[in-house]
Image (cartoon, rainbow, N blue to C red):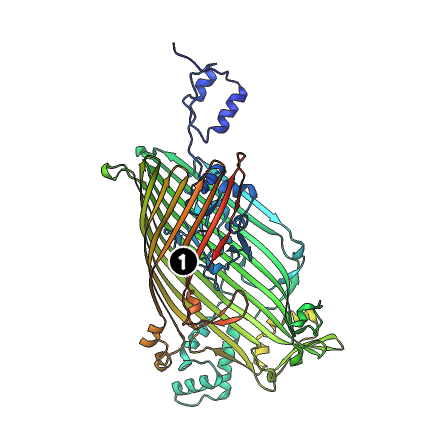
């Protein structure tokens, strides 16, 4: 006799059916349920959500090498807005500057960051790794942190690898809209200045950019290098006209160049706006679209964040080793030989957009992703520096005042194609293939940074005035323009096949990974030089001193001041660099005796790199000869081909796992570190010169891990690690 499973249809039942309809499909139609009191059977089917907590725990347990996984479900529960904030919750990871992840206390150079398995360039001017705060959590499916090296990873592994895996096809219609706001008590007041109309979008509208008149002058007034000094202008113009134009005419041309530069960078102290952000996500899924079978889906997202931060910093140089043992106030120069008090206000704008398209059919997944990530930082700061040995202190009657206004616009464009295929064709049945192609470009632009360095005068410990005179020398008004472009094209393929036998199974895998990277870096400096007898009364009060960045805003002030605009260009402050990596690997994963697992393999990498420093403003071939000679190119070229091995052993029981691993990896110098060009070191904040003689460092990594998994979903781990 046929049996029936019955239940009564009521309002609560129908509500529950409606609630879960986005995850399941039903054999019965809703109208049939309403018309009949009983139905034969309800069949619910669903797909495993990759970002769910249970799926993440299972993936972590099934990893052959030590790894931590954080899924989208966990990220949404904690409310983290970006990848960096989410990763700080992973054991053994530290968040630095709210952007960079340190694995097991090692610096960012010992960590690699990938996007869906692909290498993408960093838009940060001073670091090789990607600032993770530019990836909004709304596009993240999961974050995989592997702390033990495996051969399918890049050999430049160091302390760990972070793989950001983005969402593709949603399980159903998705629409989310979020608005957030925050107020910080540290933001009661901060420094601002007149920027451009598009600053709220994180981009300069041209207000700070190098004027066309100045660019043309750099190509016109050349003395080996571009030279816009009054002397060279007079010489070039006199040659062009066939007669001496005179000193006054040359001065007038130079002053026109000064007037063309942006000059309104005076600071104001005012209340800062609260932080706010807006996020929107929309996606949908269509099954059997146009009768083609399979499933097509899309997911789009837009995220905008506007954030202010105001901070006070104090740095000092100890007067002696013994001074570190005493408690010192900031004004106690028996402890310090020099001190610097800095108040900095930063305005960060992030504008991120992404589009994902996906298609799934019979074990084949295709995904296309485009992302545009913008992360801009606008800084205004005031620094007061004292060094008594140079008669710079309040007690000596003078200290050094520095104002900085800097707008740094960073963008990352990514186009990525991915595929996963489970073959079921005759002798190829059981083979899995995944591949990716990624074309990405990172740009950093500082359209017009101005640093003003002058003196404050004190009398009996009280502020009297801010001034500058020509006899002080230095760089009182220093402009910097920077342009960096990084392009990375890479593709890779992995092939695997599993074999099953009594008491265990064996999976063999292999593949290739190929990277081509190019970098183009340019920086230009301009400086005001004043006459020896020129004296500037910049301010008569500390409040008025904030406006010294706008002292030359009026053309009449420029005309009535003995000031000369100079182009400060060494023979090498720009560089071109390129990098290529061809990598191949083979690996095995053997499970035997039910409880034991042995995994490992070998990776081969052919690494080639070249970095050439020169000056784009050098027009004399003799000045470039030593920079671009065959000997210089050979010296700047690095060629390495090596093998990197790894091995991991895992012992598993119902509630715990024991893991042991070994891997040999490498840490290679970054392109900027090899180029003999000055850059700002992010750790010391000092300007550092690159060294073309740096060598790669090799690491032997030993890892052990004990993991405990509880019935309620909690898990605990203990991880000792050694890097040699």
Q: Secondary structure at mark 1?
A: strand
Residue 226 position within the rendered picture, expressed as x and y whole percent measured from the top left: 42, 79
> Looking at the picture, how far across and down is residue 662, in whole percent?
42, 53
Q: Is residue 404 visible?
A: yes
Q: Residue furthest front?
A: 593
- Above or below, 485 against 435 in this view is below
Name the residue nearer the viewer: 107 or 132. Answer: 107
Q: Position of residue 167 (x, y in %)?
A: 43, 43
Residue at the far right in the pictured view: 460
Is residue 293 positioned above or below 7 on the image?
Answer: below
Q: Farthest residue in the bottom direction?
A: 243
Q: Residue furthest left?
A: 426
Where does the image place residue 215, in percent across and percent down from the top left? 44, 73
Q: Residues within 10 Å of mark 1 (few under 14, many from 20)?
A: many
Q: Residue at x 31, y 49 (%)?
A: 510
Residue 140 visible in the current orientation: no
Q: Specify the quadrant of the image occupied by residue 96.
A: bottom right
In the image, taking residue 267 as reference, residue 122 lies left or right, namely left
Residue 327, image quadrant: bottom right
Residue that label 1 marks: 665
**Residue at figure coordinates x 67%, y 59% from the top left:** 189
Relative to 331, is 200 on the left or the right? left
Q: Is residue 378 above or below residue 137?
A: below
Q: Quadrant of the N terminus?
A: top left
In the rendered view, would you say 120 is above or below 477?
A: above
Instruction: Give 663 or 308, whichever is nearer the viewer.
Output: 663
Is residue 332 or residue 453 the one in the foreground?
332
Counting the numbered discs, the total is 1
């Amino acid at each position: 006799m046929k049996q029936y499973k019955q239940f009564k249809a009521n309002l609560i039942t129908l509500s529950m059916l409606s609630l879960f309809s986005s995850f399941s499909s039903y054999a019965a139609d809703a109208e049939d349920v309403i018309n009949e009191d009983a139905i034969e059977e309800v069949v619910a089917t669903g797909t495993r959500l990759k970002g769910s907590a249970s799926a993440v725990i299972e993936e972590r347990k099934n990893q052959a090498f030590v790894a931590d996984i954080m899924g989208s479900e966990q990220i949404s529960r904690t409310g983290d807005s970006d990848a960096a904030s989410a990763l700080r919750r992973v054991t053994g990871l530290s968040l630095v500057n709210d952007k960079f992840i340190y694995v097991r206390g090692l610096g960012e150079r010992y960590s690699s960051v990938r996007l869906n398995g692909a290498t993408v360039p960093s838009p940060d001017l001073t670091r090789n790794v990607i600032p993770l705060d530019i990836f909004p959590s709304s596009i993240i499916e999961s974050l995989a942190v592997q702390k033990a090296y495996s051969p399918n990873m890049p050999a430049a592994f160091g302390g760990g690898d972070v793989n950001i895996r983005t969402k593709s096809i949603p399980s159903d219609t998705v629409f989310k809209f979020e608005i957030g706001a925050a107020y910080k008590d540290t933001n009661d007041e901060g420094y601002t200045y007149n920027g451009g109309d598009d600053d709220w979008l994180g981009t300069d509208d041209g207000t700070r950019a190098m004027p066309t008149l100045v660019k043309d002058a750099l190509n016109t007034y050349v003395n080996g290098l571009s030279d816009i000094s009054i002397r060279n202008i007079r010489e070039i113009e006199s040659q062009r006209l066939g007669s001496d134009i005179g000193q006054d005419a040359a001065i007038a041309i130079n002053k026109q160049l000064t007037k063309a530069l942006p000059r309104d960078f005076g600071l104001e102290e005012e209340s800062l706006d609260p932080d706010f952000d807006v996020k929107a996500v929309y996606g949908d899924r269509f099954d059997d679209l146009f009768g083609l079978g399979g499933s097509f889906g899309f997911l789009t997202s837009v995220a905008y964040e506007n954030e202010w931060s105001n901070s006070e910093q104090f740095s000092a140089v100890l007067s002696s080793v013994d001074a570190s043992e005493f408690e010192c106030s900031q004004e106690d120069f028996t402890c310090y030989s020099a001190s610097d008090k800095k108040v900095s206000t930063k305005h960060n704008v992030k504008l991120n957009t992404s589009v994902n398209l996906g298609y799934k059919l019979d074990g084949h997944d295709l995904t296309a992703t485009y992302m545009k990530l913008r992360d801009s930082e606008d800084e205004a700061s005031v620094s007061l520096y004292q060094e008594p040995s140079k008669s710079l202190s309040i007690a000596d009657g003078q200290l050094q005042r520095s104002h900085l206004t800097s707008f740094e616009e960073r963008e990352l464009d990514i186009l990525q194609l991915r595929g996963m295929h489970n073959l079921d064709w005759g002798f190829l049945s059981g083979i899995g293939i995944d591949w990716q192609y990624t074309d990405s470009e990172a740009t950093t632009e500082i359209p017009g940074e101005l640093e003003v360095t002058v003196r404050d005068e004190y009398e009996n410990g009280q502020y009297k005035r801010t001034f500058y005179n020509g006899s002080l020398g230095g760089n009182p008004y220093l402009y910097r323009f920077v342009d960096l472009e990084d392009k990375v094209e890479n593709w890779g393929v992995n092939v695997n096949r599993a074999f099953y036998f009594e008491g265990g199974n064996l999976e063999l895998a292999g593949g290739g990974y190929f990277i081509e990277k190019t970098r183009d870096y340019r920086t230009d400096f301009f400086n005001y030089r004043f006459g020896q007898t020129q004296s500037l009364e910049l301010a008569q009060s500390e409040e008025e001193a904030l406006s010294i960045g706008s002292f030359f805003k009026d053309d009449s002030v420029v005309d009535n001041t003995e000031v000369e605009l100079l182009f400060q260009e060494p023979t090498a402050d720009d560089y071109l660099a390129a990098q290529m990596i061809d990598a191949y690997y083979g690996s095995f994963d053997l499970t035997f005796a039910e409880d034991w697992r042995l995994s490992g393999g070998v990776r081969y990498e052919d690494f080639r790199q070249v970095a050439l420093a020169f000056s784009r403003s050098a027009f004399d071939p003799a000045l470039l000869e030593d920079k671009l000679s065959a000997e210089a190119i050979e010296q700047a070229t690095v060629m390495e081909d090596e093998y990197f091995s790894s091995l991991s052993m895992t012992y598993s029981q119902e509630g715990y796992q024991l893991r042991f691993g070994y891997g040999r990896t490498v840490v290679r110098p970054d392109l900027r570190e090899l180029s003999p060009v000055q850059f700002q070191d992010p750790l010391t904040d000092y300007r550092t010169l690159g060294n073309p003689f740096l060598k790669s460092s090799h690491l032997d990594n030993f890892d052990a891990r004990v993991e405990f998994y509880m019935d309620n979903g909690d898990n605990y781990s203990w991880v000792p690690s050694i890097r040699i």
